[in-house]
Amino acid sequence: MSEQVKALTNEGLPYDDMDEQVEAARSHAIKECRRYNFLVNSENRYDLSILKNLFHSMGENVYIESNFQCEFGFNISLGKNIYFNHDMIILDCNEVTVGDDVYVGPRVGLYGANHAEDPIERSEHVVYAKPIHIQDKVWLGAGVHVLQGVTIGENTIIGAGSVVTNDIPADVIAAGNPCKVIRPIRKKDREGLKR
């Protein structure tokens, strides 16, 4: 069933968000996320096998704090050495890829879906989705919202509270609503370990 829903949602074309198969796939993801979060919150047990079975792929050393939520799961591909802080939301109605060595602050959202602009279509549950790509060594600050169709280049930092509506290049610090490049990351920004 998930392959049929994946084909429907990943075309980037309008689809019925209340389609029976779409709703069933969403319900499955909600149940699995709740199961994962319950174990974290009640037993301090991070059973990543639950999410690994839900996602398309997941690398090693992934750490996901409690209250994680996703739309379907099967569109999520995670690299290695990733940290998602509390209250992460991924609406993976299209591909959402996260590279290696990515840090994500609390209450961050990656939103691949959007409702139809036309009010009649919107009332008929018409949505469409575009992919999101977060490349290697990106840091998303607390409360960042990344919208559909966005790619964030490697090494880039997105400041807390930003709303990312367009692609952001590699090796920059960007922030704001809408998010804009502030400056490049410089070698002098390197803090170095104090031993």
Image (spheres, helix red, strand yellow):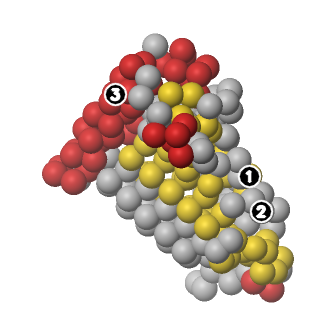
Q: Which mark is residue 32?
A: none
Q: Is residue 144 above or below residue 16?
A: below
Spatial CA distance of label 2 from label 1 is 6 Å
Q: Position of residue 125 (x, y in %)?
A: 47, 35
The residue to which callout 3 is attached is 28
Look at the image and tell me in which quarter the C terminus lies: bottom right
Q: Position of residue 23 (x, y in %)?
A: 38, 27
Q: Is residue 20 left or right of residue 116?
A: left
Q: Position of residue 58 (x, y in %)?
A: 54, 36
First in sequence, mark 2 or 3: give its number.
Answer: 3
Residue 103 visible in the snapshot: yes
Q: Residue at x 33, y 37 (%)?
A: 30
Q: Quadrant of residue 20?
A: top left
Which structural element holds mark 3?
A: helix
- Please name whichever residue, 91 or 194, is drawn nearer the observer in this view of the structure: 91
Residue 32 visible in the snapshot: no
First in sequence, mark 2 or 1: give its number.
Answer: 1
Which structural element holds mark 1?
A: strand
Q: Is residue 139 left or right of residue 92?
A: right
Q: Quadrant of residue 24?
A: top left
Q: Is residue 24 above or below residue 146?
A: above
Amino acid type of disc 2? Ile
The residue to which callout 2 is attached is 168
Amino acid type of disc 3? His
Q: Residue at x 61, y 58 (%)?
A: 146
Q: Is residue 93 left or right of residue 134?
A: left
**Tag count:** 3
Spatial CA distance of label 2 from label 3 is 33 Å
Q: Which mark is residue 151?
A: 1
CA neighbours of label 2 inside 10 A, class few (<14), some (14 to 19), many (20+)? many
Spatial CA distance of label 1 from label 3 is 28 Å
